[in-house]
Image (spheres, coloured by chain):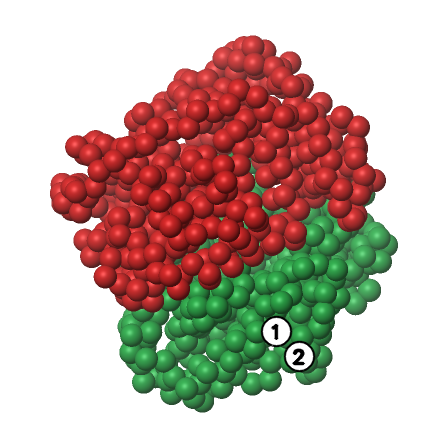
Chain colours: A green, B red
């Protein structure tokens, strides 16, 4: 029977481990409480700069030695700035974990912060910002986030140009000292592992790690409403968002089932109505994004100027029409889709390490695949329809990018 | 011991199946000889239109009924136009394959070709073309392909506007009749499967399928050289390509090991020289692309106007410097990386189904993971360095997109 080991170490670090039978690989997800929501308001971009600079040498090793040491073990690692967390992910063969762990822990505990790393780190951060010019879909979705969510969870993970330009090594170091703390951090493993050996190894490597940080207070007011971003292009990118339930047990599964009816595959309503019947756009999708304190349904479509207004109208209409309920056949397909995806998730060590880490953050405990499957089995057509009746989409926030504003 | 079942059916269809212990999912890759290289020269885009229209109803079922039937089984399917093949991929739970196969085979054997599907299919194909305006990286790499390879393997998988606008249903049907033939097609499965039951099921469903097609002759001359695409943007996208060995046993593994030294991770030469030391660009990569008759090394970098010339210069220099050889430590990391990736591939049913199908096409037989691991084990530093000395990068083809041309 699959089981997830879970232990909170004395310093507050939550350690989780899910052994996966037959796997040779081992994936690790470390969520640190250093996402963009923690950034000082004159240092937007300190999080992505920190996430880059911890890849440039740690412990006794300089940038090159440290990367080489990881690659000699076949470890693939990456860092990523999210809203709530700064995430360090790694994948390796399970039997390399003993050697890999000290190198990975050093990235968190003992980054080098070499003077020489500062300018290349800054240049890369600025270039990621510049590259947005060629990523209109990402631009629309970042602007949607900025309007839809309140401060400080509405921030771009890329930072702000003037702040990046002025960032000092001391500011990055002090952000690291403040946010890379064990209390509030979650370290999850999935794949080939020996729990008691792994637990002892982690406990030993992190025994002298101390500290805690409060999650920033979320302001009440968001801008919301409609915004058009002018761009001289024949393409139109549309982003939309509205409130949904937070991530928790049953109601988030009901929201997921409903979103799956809307956007779950080639017979999903959006795909059928917008893309297949009308050929209106080359991309259309909706997703549910659930966090412990709030949730949202996000929508995106990419289309051309002459089809943009109709695309937006049909999108809004299909999202609103969900409150009228779904039929038995749509419901069955959504449930089968959710269950198939659980099986696929179970065959990926990386997906499972991420899933149990976010469960720990959102729900306070990880769920096994078995528990998730039981939750899906407990969903009925009646429950989904009652849920959608009671949770009608409220006010929608819309952002468009293109050569002319739309009516909304 | 892992084993790959392989059988050529009387009609010429190559059937492959790799059972994966512990997997519950089953992935399928069907390679049909209908990639863009087969398109008539006045019908560029007939392949992507066919690949879209076969998702719009098949057998006795209309578009919606057919999509719904697949989704009731939890089958995720997709189609894709490549240069040499039109690919149909599907993923499902292994115990659904008996019910799913007739629906998937119908897409190939009995598409509906409803009149009503033509215009939405055309609109989507045109919009995919329009969307290129917002995808400068893809634009550069498509233009690089067009210059680097000879006709007809240099074509865009998206077709040509005027041809898409004029395409008739009869042209699509006749392309289907000509190219969707069993002789030359490869059907590969990986995951949870029972070989003898699967074999019988496929044989029965395809018994009356007949036909063969010759692969088009590749013209000798490609344009190559340097091309600049003018665009009013602060970003510069750089694509480069040069000849490498075809996909086969040993020399392609040596080429892969060398490319891995160049671009295999955070300690790869390109990453270190271009991105880490100089902070020159936000993205830089190189990859080896091997086919049965030829191979290429492809490079890409995304950067800003002031850094573009230096980025291109360093890229070219690092590719050329490979012929001077790699050191023991770089070599060891590359080998560890190749072996780790094999293990990861073995944990993904989709990756294995694709890999054995392309092995069958390129080498005439699929390789087990064990055989691939043995090939990697047989690689030595001496062999890699001798190979790189004998296979110096030749003439390079370069395409840039940005506000000014570079010196090359």
Residue A195 in view in this figure: no
The relative height of residue B386 versus residue A358 in the rendered view (above or below) is above
Identify which residue, A217 or A299, lies in the foreground.
Answer: A299
| Residue A143: percent from left, percent from top | 69, 67
Quadrant position of the C terminus of chain A in the picture: bottom right
Q: Which mark is residue A407?
A: 2
A371 sits to left or right of B397: left
Using residue B332 as the reference point, say whether residue A337 is left or right of it.
Answer: left
Image quarter (top left, top right, bottom left or bottom right) of the N terminus of chain A: bottom left
Q: For the residue carrying disc 1, how many other residues have a C-alpha within 10 Å: few (<14), some (14-19), or many (20+)?
A: some
For label 1, the residue is A309
Left or right: B99 with respect to A229?
Answer: left
C-alpha distance separating marks 2 and 1:
7 Å
State how many labels appear: 2
Does B338 sit above or below residue A316?
above
Please say if the residues under marks 2 and 1 sit with CB atoms less than 8 Å apart.
yes
Nearer to the camera, B152 or A76:
B152
User: Could you say whether the residue bearing mark 1 is in a helix, strand or loop?
Assistant: helix
Relative placement, left or right, of A240 versus A119 is: left
Q: Which mark is residue A47?
A: none
């Amino acid at each position: 029977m699959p089981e997830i080991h879970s232990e909170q170490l004395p310093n507050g670090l939550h350690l989780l481990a899910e052994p996966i039978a037959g796997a040779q690989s081992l994936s690790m997800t470390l969520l640190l409480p250093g996402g963009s929501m923690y950034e000082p308001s004159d240092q937007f971009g300190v999080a992505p700069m920190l996430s880059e600079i911890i890849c440039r040498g740690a412990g006794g090793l300089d940038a090159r030695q440290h990367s080489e040491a990881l690659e000699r073990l076949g470890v693939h690692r990456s860092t990523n700035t999210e809203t709530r967390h700064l995430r360090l992910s790694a994948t390796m063969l399970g039997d390399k974990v003993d050697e890999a762990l000290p190198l990975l822990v050093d990235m968190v505990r003992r980054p080098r912060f070499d003077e020489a790393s500062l300018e290349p780190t800054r240049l890369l951060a600025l270039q990621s910002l510049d590259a947005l010019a060629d990523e209109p879909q990402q631009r629309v979705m970042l602007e949607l986030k900025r309007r839809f969510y309140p401060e400080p969870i509405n921030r771009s993970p890329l930072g702000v140009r003037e702040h990046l330009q002025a960032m000092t090594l001391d500011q990055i170091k002090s952000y690291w000292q403040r946010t890379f703390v064990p209390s509030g951090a979650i370290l999850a493993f999935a794949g080939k592992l020996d729990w008691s050996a792994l637990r002892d190894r982690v406990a030993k490597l992190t025994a002298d790690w101390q500290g805690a940080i409060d999650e920033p207070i979320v302001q009440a007011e968001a801008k919301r409403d409609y915004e058009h971003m002018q761009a001289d292009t024949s393409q139109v990118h549309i982003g939309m968002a509205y409130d949904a339930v937070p991530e928790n047990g049953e109601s988030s599964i009901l929201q997921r089932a409903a979103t799956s009816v809307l956007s779950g595959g080639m017979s999903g309503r959006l795909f059928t109505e917008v893309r297949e019947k009308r050929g209106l756009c080359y991309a259309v999708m909706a997703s549910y994004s659930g966090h412990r304190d709030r949730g949202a349904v996000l929508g995106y479509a990419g289309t051309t100027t002459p089809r943009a207004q109709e695309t937006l109208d049909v999108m809004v209409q299909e999202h609103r029409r969900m409150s009228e309920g779904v039929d038995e056949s749509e419901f069955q397909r959504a449930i089968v889709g959710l269950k198939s995806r659980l099986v696929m998730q179970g065959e990926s060590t990386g997906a499972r390490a991420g899933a149990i880490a976010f469960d720990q953050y959102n729900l306070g405990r990880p769920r096994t695949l078995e528990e998730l499957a039981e939750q899906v089995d407990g969903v009925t057509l009646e429950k989904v329809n009652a849920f959608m009746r009671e949770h009608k989409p409220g006010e929608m926030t819309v952002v468009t990018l293109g050569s002319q504003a739309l009516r909304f």
